[in-house]
Image: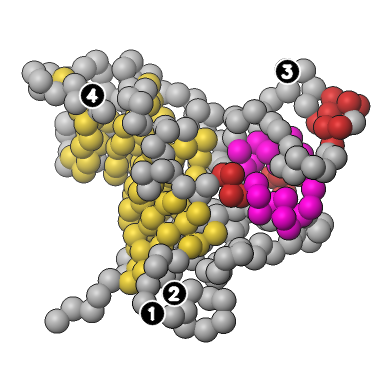
Amino acid sequence: MDAIVLSVAFSPDGKRLASASGDQTVRLWDAESGQPLGARLTGHDAVVWRVAFSPDGKRLASASVDKTVRLWDAKSGQPLGPPLKGHDAIVQSVAFSPDSKRLASASKDKTVRLWDAESGQPLGPRFMGHDSNVRSDAFSPDGKRLASASHDKTVRLWDVDLQSWLKRACAIANRNLTRQEWRKYQGNLPHRKTCPDLSGPDDDPQTAAIQSPPGASKAPSAESASAPTEAPGPAVTAPPVIPSRPDGRARIGPTPVQPVSPVPPASGNRKEPVTSPAGP
């Protein structure tokens, strides 16, 4: 390395080590011999802040000052697709879900993002609620919650259970998601009805053909791209309240959740984030 080393991570089997450096590169090492494995992993345009292996050991994620996240093949070191772009400032943390299918990133832009780890596509809107730099994030062991830590002196918990998102969509919108909406919130999971008891666009073969022609790209549709991208700021109590978009469709996305606490909410439906205890 030609500069400060900022992060290290072991592969799940303990045989390899990854390091992130101020020289804008990532390196893979043999954890037993200490020898480098292959060439440096290049592609970032600024300091690499954090690295993390997926639990299945197949992917390596890196977060950088260049505002991007990159995914790499953990064995060959080859980049997996283009950089993940969606933050407006330094990305300081990355974390894989326990099933290795999703990736969360935390940024100095005060937000957290969720990504499909296979396709690199963003899942849902940005997680908003922190008032300052988000420094770290971590999934719960069951993958249904995500915790984020911030310079605003708080920790926030988020509902990231995709099945929960679908149930809320059905309850509020009372309709099935289109294929474009499904890709936006569920990534590469096979498309199915959000509300099993309701008819949907795919019940019409011609509509289904228009929505998903053979060989169609999985890039977000123009409708998805023009839709609001921000999640509602205030934390809410269950059942979650999701504002509707101007076109009348319900917005789906992360909902801040409150852990068990003896302290009641400050007022109304708003819940206060978890805060660090005051110093002596």
Q: Is residue 108 left or right of residue 190?
A: left
Can residue 222 be seen here? The reply is no
The Cα atoms of the two marked residues, 2 and 1, are separated by 9 Å
Q: Earlier in the sequence, mark 2 or mark 1?
A: 1
Residues at marks 4 and 1 touching, judged by CB atoms closer than 8 Å: no
The Cα atoms of the two marked residues, 3 and 2, are separated by 47 Å
Give the residue at mark 1: 263
> Label 1 amino acid?
Val
Q: Earlier in the sequence, mark 3 or mark 2?
A: 3
Under tag 2, what secondary structure? loop
> 151 and 65: which one is in front?
151
Q: Position of residue 245 (x, y in %)?
A: 74, 59
Asked if the stretch drawn in magenta spans residue 135, the answer is no
Q: Residues within 10 Å of mark 4 (few under 14, many from 20)?
A: few
Give the residue at mark 3: 215
Q: Residues within 10 Å of mark 2 (few under 14, many from 20)?
A: some
In the image, the segment drawn in magenta is: 166-186
Q: Is residue 191 left or right of residue 268?
A: right
Q: Earlier in the sequence, mark 3 or mark 4?
A: 4
Give the residue at mark 4: 13
Say which residue appears at 25% left-offset and 28% top-offset: 11
